[in-house]
């Protein structure tokens, strides 16, 4: 079945880069997403990547996809205090279009 | 500004009571998901619908949970009878085919 794994916690100093990693099992995944959840709020889409791409850059965000290893990463450059949140990796496949989420990585920013 | 609307935002109820959570998906979105979020389990997919038809509700305890879409503008999730272990945040999300999902703000349920 489908499964998405990610580490639960990451601490980064303000101004450094944050790298959040994720692995998934479904080789037929077509879209891979990164969502951000701030306290008391729902999930907001940060960025996504098609499975036929290996990199996508959007301002401070860089997504890398290694389809062979089923590994996805999100790099946040120049991490700010406002980046403190839970980041969810998710995948979906064409065959059913349901979205499966990892447990989320809580990003903590050190001063 | 299109958004997914969930009501109520917070619900405190006694064990054994019926709980109904409602979701208004974004107009034009034909797929609706219900997720449950807890610290221990993360985000669990409970059920989802496409064009109002249930596609998968295998994540939902069938004896007490039920999910329906009476029409395209309303999805409901009911728990009867509720138990303390049902305490969680319940999220609704909607999407069109092959696009990202948009989430509501969630219903925080506490069963005492």
Image (cartoon, rainbow, N blue to C red):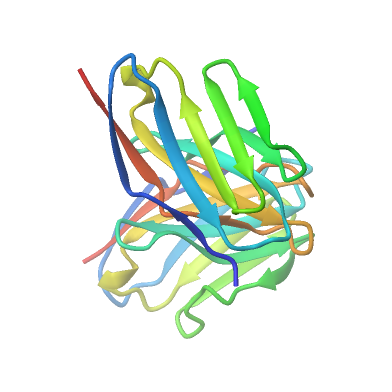
For the image, the number of numbered tags is 0
Q: Is residue B15 above or below residue A52?
A: below
Quarter-of-image position of residue B55: bottom right
Left/right placement of residue A44 relative to residue B71 reads left
Q: Is residue A26 above or below residue A57?
A: below
Q: In terms of depth relative to the viewer, which is nearer, B109 or A93? A: A93
Residue B79 in the image, given as x and y percentages of width and height: 44, 72
Residue at position x 67%, y 59% in the image: A98
Residue lying farthest to the front in this orientation? A68
Residue A5: x and y in percent read 46, 56
Q: Nearer the viewer, residue B106 or A59?
A: A59
- Image quarter in which the N terminus of chain A is found: bottom right
Q: Residue at x 51, y 74 (%)?
A: B60
The residue shown at (59%, 63%) is A25
Location of residue A71 in the rendering, given as x and y in whole percent from the top left corner:
56, 49
Residue B4 visible in the snapshot: no
Is residue A63 visible in the rendered image? The answer is yes
Toward which corner of the image does residue B13 lie, by quadrant? bottom left
- Relative to B99, is B93 on the left or the right? left
Relative placement, left or right, of A63 versus B52 is left
Query: Quick one: A7 or B15, which is closer to the camera?
Result: A7
> Dividing the image into 4 quarters, which one contains the C terminus of chain A?
top left
* Residue B98 picture location, percent across and down: 77, 47
Direction from residue B90 to residue B29 in the image, left or right: right
């Amino acid at each position: 079945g489908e499964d998405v794994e990610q580490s639960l916690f990451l601490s980064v100093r303000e101004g450094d880069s944050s790298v959040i990693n994720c692995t998934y099992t479904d080789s037929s995944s077509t879209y891979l997403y990164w969502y951000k959840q701030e306290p008391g709020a729902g999930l907001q889409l940060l960025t996504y990547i098609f499975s036929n791409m290996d990199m996508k850059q959007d301002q401070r965000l860089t997504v890398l996809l290694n389809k062979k290893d089923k590994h996805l990463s999100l790099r946040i450059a120049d991490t700010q205090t406002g980046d403190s949140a839970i980041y969810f990796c998710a995948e979906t496949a064409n065959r059913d279009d349901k979205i499966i989420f990892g447990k989320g990585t809580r990003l903590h920013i050190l001063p | 500004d299109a958004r997914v609307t969930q009501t109520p935002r917070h619900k405190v109820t006694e064990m054994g009571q019926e709980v109904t959570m409602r979701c208004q998906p974004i107009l034009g979105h034909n797929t609706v998901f219900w997720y449950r979020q807890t610290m221990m389990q993360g985000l669990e997919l409970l059920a989802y619908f496409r064009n109002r038809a249930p596609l998968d509700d295998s994540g939902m305890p069938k004896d007490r949970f039920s999910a329906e879409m009476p029409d395209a503008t309303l999805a409901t999730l009911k728990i009867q009878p509720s138990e303390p272990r049902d305490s969680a945040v319940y999220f609704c999300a909607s999407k069109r085919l092959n696009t990202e999902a948009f989430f509501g703000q969630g219903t925080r349920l506490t069963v005492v």
